[in-house]
Image (cartoon, helix red, strand yellow):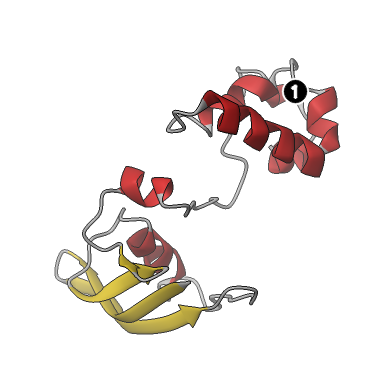
């Protein structure tokens, strides 16, 4: 599904990724493990197009991603869920979920996706019209 081949990336003159290669296959769990500053976040930002490559390639289901804009990468089916509770605390749970679907143009599919999320996290259905900032920590992580 996802293949990184000799990916290199820099912040100015500092090379952050020194030739990362990995393959994540369908049905497998792949993890990036390393100390702080070892390039885990930079690798994921490279996949998402947030960080441009100096060399190498990234493919998703055989399609090159490394020349696409982030919004095109998201449309292809990849998303990055950052660590922490990056929510809009003054918006409702429903509004937060709608923000996560802002690139979806098919309203029927968007509703189906919303139902899928609420099926996975039934506690969010109970809290749909509650402001996200008033949720418990665990509920915010679900959101």
In the shown orientation, is residue 124 left or right of residue 79? right
Q: Give the image location of residue 104, x and y in percent.
A: 46, 32
Q: Quadrant of residue 120?
A: top right
Identified at 56% across, 38% down, the residue is 86
Foreground residue among 73 and 90? 73
Foreground residue among 72 and 134? 72
- Disc 1 element: helix
In the shown orientation, is residue 20 left or right of residue 113? left
Q: Give the image location of residue 69, x and y in percent.
A: 26, 49
Residue pushed farthest left?
Answer: 13
Q: Give the image location of residue 24, x and y in percent.
A: 52, 77
Q: Give the image location of residue 9, x and y in percent.
A: 24, 71
Q: Is residue 79 above or below residue 121?
A: below
In the shown orientation, is residue 60 left or right of residue 49? right
Q: Quadrant of residue 12?
A: bottom left
Mark 1 surroundings: few (<14), some (14-19) or many (≥20) residues within 10 A: some
Badge 1 is on which residue? 134
- Count how many numbered circles sit on residues in the image: 1
Q: Is residue 38 above or below residue 96?
A: below
Q: Is residue 122 above or below residue 120?
A: above
In the shown orientation, is residue 10 left or right of residue 79? left
- Quadrant containing the C terminus in the rendered view: top right
Identified at 23% across, 75% down, the residue is 15
Identified at 23% across, 61% down, the residue is 52
Foreground residue among 116 and 133? 116
């Amino acid at each position: 599904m996802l293949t990184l081949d000799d990916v290199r990336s820099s912040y100015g003159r500092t090379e952050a990724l020194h030739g990362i290669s990995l393959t994540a296959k369908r049905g497998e769990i792949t993890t990036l493990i390393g100390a702080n500053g070892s390039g885990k976040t930079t690798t994921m930002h490279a996949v998402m197009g947030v960080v441009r490559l100096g060399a190498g390639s990234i493919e998703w289901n055989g399609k090159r991603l490394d020349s696409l804009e982030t919004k095109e990468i998201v449309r292809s089916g990849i998303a990055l869920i950052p660590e922490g509770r990056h929510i809009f605390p003054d918006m409702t749970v429903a509004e937060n979920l709608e923000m996560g679907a802002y690139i979806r143009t098919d309203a029927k599919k968007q509703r189906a996706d919303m139902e899928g999320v609420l099926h996975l996290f039934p506690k969010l259905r109970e809290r749909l019209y509650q402001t996200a900032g008033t949720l418990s920590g665990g509920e915010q992580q679900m959101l």
